[in-house]
Amino acid sequence: MDELFLYESYFIVLFHVPALFLLAFINTLIFIKAKKSALLTNFMLLQGVLVLWMASKLLKTFAPDAPLKFFFVVCQYAGVCFLGAFFVRFAHLFAKVFPPPHKVMTALYACSAVMFLVVVTNPLHHLFYSHFDFLGDSFGPLFYTQQAIQFALLLIGVLLCVKAYFASFGQKFAQAVLFTIAILIPIVANMLYVFRWFKAVFGFSPPFDITPMSASISLALFAFATFKLELFDSLNIALEKALCDVPSGILLTCGGKTAYINRTLKRMLSNGSLCTEDSVLLLEYGVKTGTVRLSFDLNEAQDFTVQNQNGRHIRVLSRPAGKVGAFVRFIDFTEKQAVLVQLKAKNEKLAAVNVQLSHQAETQRRLVVARTRNTMAVEAHDILGHSVMLALSLLEMARLSDEQGREGYIRRAADILKKGLPKLMESSTEKQECSKDIRTLLHDLVGELSGASVVIEVSATEEVSLSPESADVFYKICRESITNALRHGDCKKIDIILKGGQYEARLYVIDDGRGCGKIEKGMGITGMEQRAQALGGSLSCRTLGGQGFCVEAVLPIIK
């Protein structure tokens, strides 16, 4: 028994002491050189757990009695029980670039703490170690439960690492496979030791549990590979996750070599190169060597556009990054270029349409101005003509009257001219809506002519119902017709007849003057026609049997 103890102790010291020094050296080097991050901190925590495991195992071997030996066993499992939880956190950081959810880690830490309490309280229940003394031990049922949980957590961590490693560094397939196998070493070694399959597989049994040793080797290899690829600087994984599928091609160069190239740029390359439409080499990428050759200067900022051999439009943006590096973007904007061409063509069409619409708007504006001026001129003509002719008629009556009646006619003539001036001013402003009934308007018009040299009679049917617009038009047609009769017809009597039906209304203004052989349309008659036509009606003028004159206006009934 003493020889076996010396044999095991010898090999434990032989392997564990150099391993501890090697781990301390490698981890110190990594900690000094690598960027300080959460991933690096978790990696160091994993290494600390392994150091605690190996150091406790070494001290347990040389413990002088059973209680002290069990104390070092408890220290050893303080690292073993939390190894799986720490490894899951490290693998998640490695794969996802952020830690697992807080609830998940709380549950894993709680499970690890329960397992550790089972080890600490083993003397009370003997379920972890069914037998433990200074000379040896044997495992109980909870030991295998703890091992199963640890295997499951380690397997989850391994799957995360393997998936992320292949996704990030799949172009180096052999290296990815090699270091994936390295991650699996400690799990396989521990399974062979726990289930005592080592001798059946390899023909001999190691003198001690090699799990912490294999885990240390695995993590050292893993750290070496990822450290070489600048994992702890968060370059490859972070960039790969952030830039791998962006629409632009991304190239990072350092010292003439490719520090990073995303998938989009690889898809732009043809046989590892990118050429313009006239076969001028723009970029050449060596997949095996990692070198890159560009036809433009990386030491100066660049911004130019080329068309490649496939007819795609590529915009190149290059910015120097330090003395020997550069950040280059290759933006394929072929679809945008096509859209821009279409937009340009549409803008040109819109510009032509806009010019045409401008001409039409200007023509319309001129027409509106002309119509407005014409309307104002017609209105002024009617108001002025009516007022002057009425005043002249009253003055003629004053000339023929005696001294007493003459003053009244002159005063009325002056009032007519005074009232005509405001109406003339109103004709140049916005049209005022007529609020009076057509009968009232006609009777007011007759009232103005009372005492003049002409007799006016109004006849209107009761069923006539006109809109304010129609009443205003009939009133103005009647006013102009009376003015023309006084001015040209030398009449003595005027009859105003208004008839209404279901669909239209008719106005007749008939005088007993001398009539006319040929009707010549001046501003008065033209103005009356325009007013009637504006409401969808019509106007006609004619001589009655060689004597007298008739103006007929027809307007639709607007309901």
Image (cartoon, helix red, strand yellow):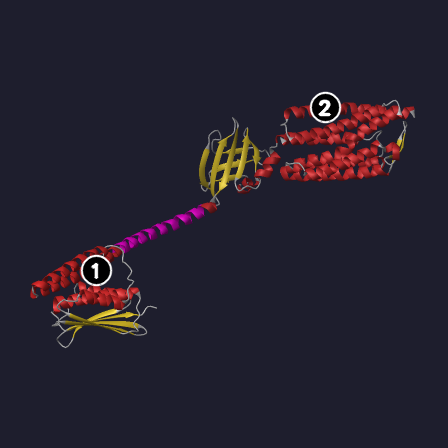
Neighbor class of circle 1 (other Cα within 10 Å; few <14, some 14-19, many 20+) is many
Q: Quadrant of residue 518?
A: bottom left
What residue lies at 60% left-to-right and 37% top-to-bottom?
240
Please name the residue shown 65% across and 29% down the image.
227
Does the residue at mark 2 contact the one at mark 1 (Cβ under 8 Å)? no
Q: Which mark is residue 379?
A: 1
Quadrant in the picture for residue 515: bottom left
Instruction: Confirm whether the magenta stretch covers residue 353.
Output: yes
Q: Secondary structure at mark 1?
A: helix
Front-lying residue, 510 or 442? 442
Question: Horizontal placement of 197 versus 156: left or right?
Answer: right
Instruction: Check disc 1 and give the amino acid type.
Output: Glu
Q: Residues within 10 Å of mark 2 (few under 14, many from 20)?
A: some
Of the pair 90 and 99, the residue shown nearer to us:
99
Locate residue 231, reporting x and y percent.
Answer: 63, 32
Image quadrant in which you'd find residue 337 = top left
Determine whether, in the image, residue 308 is placed left or right of residue 36.
Answer: left
Tell me what residue is drawn at x 21 percent, y 65 percent. Answer: 445
Q: Amino acid at mark 2?
A: Ala
Residue positioned most to the front: 404
- Quarter of the image with the N terminus is top right
Provide the residue span drawn in magenta.
337-366
Residue 375 against residue 236 in the figure, above or below: below
Residue 158 at least partly seen: no
Q: Secondary structure at mark 2?
A: helix
**Residue 334 seen by the camera:** yes
Q: How many marks?
A: 2
Residue under pointer 2: 24
N-term mark: 2 or 1: 2
- Foreground label between 2 and 1: 1
Q: Main secondary structure of the magenta part?
A: helix
Task: Measuring from the top left, give residue 453's x and y in whole percent.
Answer: 12, 68
